[in-house]
Amino acid sequence: MRLSHLLRLSLVFAGGGLALAADSGLKPVIPKYHLEQVILPSADEADMKYLAFPTLLPAGPNEVLVSFKRGYKHGGDKEAQIEAFRFDTAKNVASQRQVIAYDAGFIQQMAEWVRFPNGDIAVYMDVQHLGADGRNYRTGMRENRSRDGGKTFEGLKKSPLVDGRECGYPFDFIVEGNTTYMLVMGFGYRPGERWSVDVIKSTDNGGSWSFVRNLSTEFGIPQTESAFIRHGDGFIVSTVGYDQNLMARLHETDGNFKVRRQVELTRKYPFIERSIGRPRLFKRDGNLYLLGRNWRTTEPHGSKMELVLLKIDPASLAVTQWAILDNLERASVTDGYYAMPYFQDHDGQTYLSIITYKGVDGRPPQIIRLEYLWNEIR
């Protein structure tokens, strides 16, 4: 199947029409260098043109593994599959596209990668089906494993229960020594009968998992999409709350995921009107960053979706800088911006690349790569 490698280079400057919240004290960073590459165009697909939710795993000095959903719509498809490809980050070329999760009649919705301490690579899937009422329901997490660096996979299987509870929607992983932590959501109508986002851990490369902490109870909020990262002797967690219009929060915990403090971002920063959707946390140059989808209202365009990068002070959990990475032009992005970063050096410069998806004006989204000069947005 043909892959598109055409690049669109745009120089984006701060322009008129941005209604910024003066009381926030923070003006947005607008990158001057902004490159967009369409990796997988939806128009090239004969069927199942909805390409969405890419996630990635570093596979070498100049290579990442990328998974994505190929289906019919954001949710509620009749079925969908997870595909993967290898992406050469020096040449910006995709190869070895393959299906890694398909089960007739089921919706393979979202996948997350992990490299276990023994070197095995596994991908964990959020799997759904349509009920008789036409609504989406989870069916329990599935997994697929590779022992050859992601070239081949052993086959799809259902993930085991964790202390009698079925896990459903994987969000993030942290691997330290022989321990692998997973941040995962479970659902009240599935075995275990609890709606919560939990931390679980494995010390045998994903052969079995044990319960660590119910973060929904610990943080005192109903929550969904979350991310976490090690910080000092504890962790920092970014959450999307189901309460009050999907509020964005940051939480600091100790090493056992007991909360030390938590802050609300949505109320504190007027440019964050809802949550930071499908958040990703990463560290670079000693700083902490939060990447994700943001909604913001400007005149005369109204509320629009955009991709933002927030610089976080880990000592206070305050936002010290925010950059608008995509949709400065205030287009009607109707679906997009589950985003994951990687860095690449060339020509004496460090570049931030982001693999994400975007659909405009109701058209099927496609898998894209965005590139920025790191020194402009760091």
Image (cartoon, grey):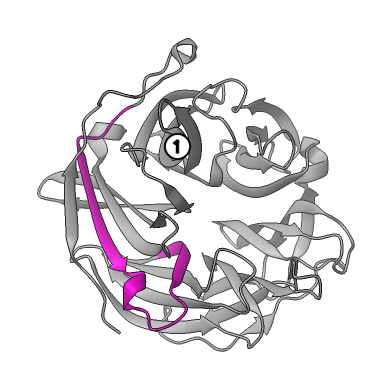
The residue that label 1 is drawn on is: 289
Q: Point out residue 322 in the picture as x, y percentages from the top left corner.
A: 40, 29
Side of 215 where 324 appears, left or right: left
Q: Which residues are magenta?
A: 29-57
Determine the image quadrant of residue 366.
bottom left
Residue 280 visible to an observer of this rendering: yes
- The residue at the point 79 percent across, 58 percent down is 211
Looking at this view, is 20 or 178 the one in front? 20
Give the quadrant of the C terminus: top left
Q: Can residue 56 be found in the magenta stretch?
A: yes
Rendered location of residue 29, percent (x, y)? 32, 27
Residue at 48% across, 29% down: 297
- Relative height, residue 55 to residue 196 (above, below): below
Position of residue 349 measured from the top left corner of the image (x, y, whole percent): 16, 44
Look at the picture and state if 100 lies above or below 274: below
Q: Amino acid at mark 1?
A: Tyr
Q: Is residue 61 visible?
A: no
Measured as percent of width and height from the top left, residue 14 is found at 25, 27
Left or right of 194, for residue 96: left
Comparing 184 with 307, the one in front is 307
Q: Nearer the viewer, residue 20 or 377?
A: 20
Residue shown at 42%/38% (left/top)?
308
Q: Residue at x 56, y 36 (%)?
A: 232
